[in-house]
Structure formats: structure tokens, C-alpha cells
Amino acid sequence: MFDSDKWQEIFATIKKNKLRTFLTALGVGWGIFMLVFLLGVGKGMENGVKREFAGEAVNSIWVWRGKTTLPYKGLKPGREIFFTNEDYETAQNKMSNIDFIGVRNSLWGEFTINYKNKNGSFQVYGSNYNFFKLNGEKIQTGRFINDLDMDEKRKIVVIGVRVKNVLFGDKDPIGEYIEIKGVYFKVVGVFTRKGGNGRLEERIYMPFTTYQATFNPQKRIHLVGIAAKEGVPAKEVEDQIRTLLSEKYKFDPKDKQAIGINNNQEEYERTMGLFTGIAAIVWFVGLGTLAAGIVGVSSIMLIIVKERTKEIGIRKAIGATPWSIISLVLQESIFITSMAGYIGLLLGVGLLELIRAMIEQVEMGGGEVSYFSRPEVNMSVAITATLILVIAGALAGLFPAMRAANIKPIEALRAE
């Protein structure tokens, strides 16, 4: 039941001790502010890392050539390993636990990409369509490389957004021809790719077969991406491909330098595990800071009870019940902690929204904040924080309230 007299007394006490109340509330507000802000920043970092993985097949591994560092069956270390088209076909035929394979080669050397009177230096690759499914490029206009392009070794390319901006500006590049090392290629698509501060959009892709026929007569493969079938651990695929290649090229399967392998699934799980640890630390620090504020509230309430000992004695002498004394102290404690926590919550969420708006402005201008995106706090966290505050406020005032209720009227009246 609402008691207006009791609340008038609470506000009068707060008004009388403004500085003390402010410093007490500051400790609680700062605690909830830090908790919300740190959780939001942690979520922003997690979102940023997920964006870096965006589009990439998480259950995939990447394999590239290396050099042996261990002797094996009479063969000396230092041998270079080169992959060929035969390895690609062998993996497809012998590995039943894989979904598909993507390949990519890089065009080495110094050269510029020319279109009429414009030119620029960009990375050029030969790849198949499966590579895009693994790597995360998204088509913006036109199309990707298809099987017919591969079969007929067509001289076509798909270019990144930044390549399009430099060479074509506002002009539609589809159907235009660009020159690469004296060979002309028709532009059939423009792609986008998140991450890398835009550098991943400074690329040009042509069909892998076209690349080999034009620039790579040795028929070698530089990079292979393998997607495991659904439900198959990427580690199982990694072990199998290492065994197959070690048997063919005769190197020790324990030689990690003979071939390079990056397990995307393990890297992703390791990174997400790191953020679980960060969240636990944030909760520990935030709740510790909040607890310090709550202890401050409890201490202040004890002081208030001591200062009002004579008043409490008079109340009890004229018939005030223990519960009325307890409720008075409890309500004041809960009110201070709840209001301070609510303000801290609003400031924390407000600061996160400000940071989010600033990041969006940077992204709208074509920029990118590496490994950080969309800092946020979900509703469950906000509700949990509010409940913690209400409970903590009640506990902070409970012991001072019980002490006040146990004061004997005769002793209270003698207090100075």
C-alpha cells in the first residue's frame, strides 16, 4: 500500500543529505554503467570478428604449398611441395567426407590493369565458382564465374567494387573489356566482400582454367579450399588430406611445414571461446564494481539509522511496528539503488548507441572499423541488471533496517 507520508520523509532525508546521497548513488550507477558498457563493447568485438568470418564456410580448411623440414624415408628436408590439377581430382574422387573444393591461383609479377585511359594495380586470381562459396564474395551486379566459363576457358573476369570505382567510376562495367598483361578480358560481374578494410574488393577473378591456359602452363595450384560435409568435423578432413598428400609427395605427416593448413572451424571455435571468457571477465568486473557500490549503500544506511536512532525510538514508543521501521529503511535503500542503476543503465546504453551511430557513419562513407561492429546489449541483460539492482538494493538496506527495528525505545531515547 502506498504511504505518501513515508515517501515525503524519504525525499526529505535525501534532500537533507544531498552530497552523501549523490556519492552513494554514484557508486551504484558507475557499477551498472561499467557492466552494460563492457558487455556492449565485448559484443561489438564479437560481432566484428563474426563479420570477418561472414560468408566464409566455417566448416572448411585451406591448404597451400610448403617446404619439408624433416627427413623422410631417405629423402632430405628442404624439398618444395607443389600441388597440381591431379591432386584436385584425387581429393574429389577419394574423399567422401567433403562437400566441394575451391581452387585459386595468384598472378605474380608487376603489371597494371588498363581500361582505355585509366589504369590501376590490383590483385588478379584464377579461381572456380566453389572458391567464392568458401571465401564469401557476394555478387553486386552481373554474375559469377560458372561451369561453362571453366569448360570453354572464356576470357572473362569478375571485379571487386573498388576496382570498378577506379577503372569505371559511375559507368556500368558489365560487357566492357580490361587489359591484363596484354590480354583482354570481358567484365561479367562486380562483387563485394566484407572485411579487410576494403582491400578484399581490390581483386579481379578469372576462370581457373583460363588462368592456367594463359598464365600458368605448369598447371600448378597455389591454394585449395575444402568444405567438409555437414556434420563432419573439419579436423577429420584436415587429417585425411594431410595423409593423402604425404603419401603422394613422400613427406612425414608430422611435418607441419611441408604443407600449410588453416582449419577455419577450429579458428572460429577458438575465437568464440575467447569471447565467452571475455564475457565472464566482464561480468566479474562489472558485478564487483556494482557490489562495491551496494556495500556503500549499506554503509550509508547504517549511518542513517544511527543518526535517526532517537527518532526511531520515538516512533516505536508511540506504537510504530517493527515492519514499518524496516519498510521505511528498505524503501529508501531500494529507491537510491534503483534510480542510480537506471541512470547508469541509460548512460551505458546511450554511449553504446552513440558509438554504433559513429561506426555506421564511417561505414556509410566507405570505411570500416576492423574487428568491431554493432556494440549492443540485449534485453535479457538489461532485465537481469535491473533485477540485480532491485535485489541488491533490498539486501543493502535489510541489515540496517533490522538493526533499526531491534532498537529498544528507552535506549533510543537516551541516544545523543
Image: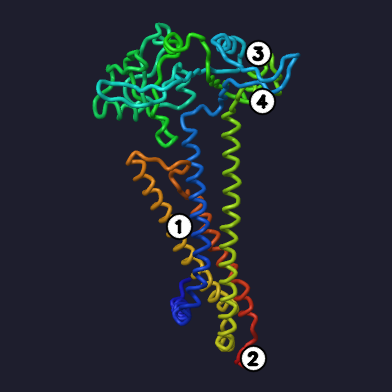
Quadrant holding the C terminus: bottom right
Q: Residues within 10 Å of mark 3 (few under 14, many from 20)?
A: some
The residue under the point 51% across, 9% down is 218
Mark 2 or 4, closer to the camera: 4
> What residue does disc 3 label?
249
Q: Which residue is mark 2?
A: 410
Q: Could you give the CA–CA distance between mark 2 and mark 3, rounded to whole angstroms?
A: 97 Å
Q: Do the CB atoms of the residues marked 1 and 3 lie less than 8 Å apart?
A: no
Specify the amino acid type for callout 3.
Tyr
Q: Position of residue 66 (x, y in %)?
A: 61, 21
Q: Is residue 346 left or right of residue 99?
A: left
The residue labelled by disc 1 is: 348
Q: CA distance from mark 4 to mark 1?
A: 47 Å
Task: Locate residue 97 relative to residue 145 in the image: left or right.
Answer: right
Between the residue at mark 2 and the residue at mark 1, the CA separation in whole angstroms equals: 48 Å
The circle drawn on residue 256 is 4
